[in-house]
Amino acid sequence: MEQAADTVTVYSFRVFELDAEAYHVASFKAPRHVITERFHGDVLEGTGVEVDADELDEQGRYRRIATGWGALD
């Protein structure tokens, strides 16, 4: 029997840019704890998507590609 892969919920989020003095939405999704701890961003609730944990890059990012949400190669 095949074992299920570990999954994680990733979210869109926004960060405040000091130079522009405005918020912008990040170009990738990330797990909630990565958003708040690493990127100091605000989670955009309602944008969560469950993905395989091995699809995150080494910094915890899940990037959108032309075929949908996924890692960039």
Image: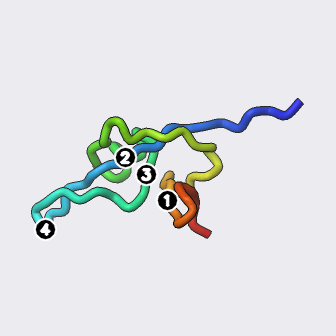
Mark 3 → mark 4, Cα distance in angstroms? 22 Å
Q: Earlier in the sequence, mark 1 or mark 3?
A: 3
Residue at point 49%, 60% (across, down): 64
Mark 1 → mark 2, Cα distance in angstroms? 14 Å
Residue at point 49%, 41% (across, down): 49
Residue topped by disc 3:
29
Q: Earlier in the sequence, mark 2 or mark 3?
A: 3
Q: Please tell me whether mark 2 or mark 3 is closer to you in this view.
A: 3
| Mark 2 touches mark 4? (CB < 8 Å) | no
Q: Earlier in the sequence, mark 1 or mark 2?
A: 2
Q: SS class of the residue under badge 2?
A: helix
Residue topped by disc 1:
63
Q: Residue furthest left?
A: 21
Residue topped by disc 2:
35
Crowding at label 4, few (<14), some or many (≥20) Cα neighbours within 10 Å? few
Q: Earlier in the sequence, mark 1 or mark 4?
A: 4
In-image side of 72 versus 21 (left or right): right
Closer to us: 68 or 22? 68
Closer to us: 39 or 42? 42
| Mark 2 touches mark 3? (CB < 8 Å) | no
- Say which amino acid is labelled 4: Ala
In-image side of 54 versus 66 (left or right): right
Crowding at label 2, few (<14), some or many (≥20) Cα neighbours within 10 Å? many
Above or below, 48 against 18 in this view is above
- Say which amino acid is labelled 2: Ile
Residue topped by disc 4:
20
- Residue 5 in view (yes/no): yes
